[in-house]
Amino acid sequence: MRAALLLHVLASTVALAAGSASATPEFHPSQTAAEQTLARILTLDRDKPEQINPAIGSSGRRPRTTPPPGAIYLKYLTMPLALAILAEESRDVKVECGGIYKSGEECGMDSDPIICAQDSPDSYLFRTKRSRPSLAIVEAAWPPGQGAQIKADASYRLKLTDGVWKIDGISCGAGGAYNWSAR
């Protein structure tokens, strides 16, 4: 009788643990390979945006609609994502500045499409919403202030391409998306 009761308690504990494992994971510092890659890309975007953000243009020029040969950002972003960001930037520059970057004018996107914001935090917290061997959906959040609740600032679809994780889609929490579907 006692053994049967002990076995029932043990089975209930295992079932509860399994149930809590399926709940939405908490945000945490980067842990998985996809999260660690995303953390490195977001940090590089903060420190050297010209290496990550395809939407950086120069005065007197039209925005690019395709990446230039050897574009360094293609080490971190897939071609479909880069093309989606360039298309959005081109549309914005056309509407705001007649299709050409102008000195002293705010032309193009008003926030960095990689981080979905104008400013960048010193660090991020992550949670993986879906993971497969060559695909991950990862949410990133700014660390909250004292007593504030954590919420996702952006969702990223990462693809493992030739052994390297790259961002393939971005969905900004405040609106806007680039090559995004949660496939």
Image (tube, rainbow, N blue to C red):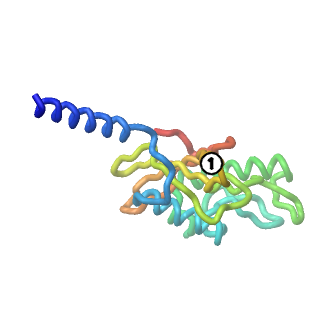
Give the image location of residue 67, x and y in percent.
60, 61
In this rendering, would 5 be left or right of 23? left
For the N terminus, the image quarter is top left
Which amino acid type is marked by label 1? Asp
Residue at screen point 59% across, 68% down: 44
- The answer to whether residue 4 is visible is yes
Residue at screen point 60% across, 47% down: 150
Using the image as rendered, state which of residue 127 and residue 21 is in the foreground: 21
Residue at screen point 27% across, 37% down: 13
Seen in the picture, residue 55 relative to 27 is either above or below; the reply is: below
Give the image location of residue 174, x and y in percent.
69, 43
In this rendering, would 29 be left or right of 9? right
Label 1 secondary element:
loop
The residue sitting at the right extreme is: 104
- The answer to whether residue 68 is visible is no
Q: Which residue is mark 1?
A: 153
Give the image location of residue 19, x and y in percent.
34, 35
Residue at screen point 84% across, 49% down: 96
Using the image as rendered, state which of residue 168 and residue 46 is in the foreground: 46
In this rendering, would 49 be left or right of 170? right
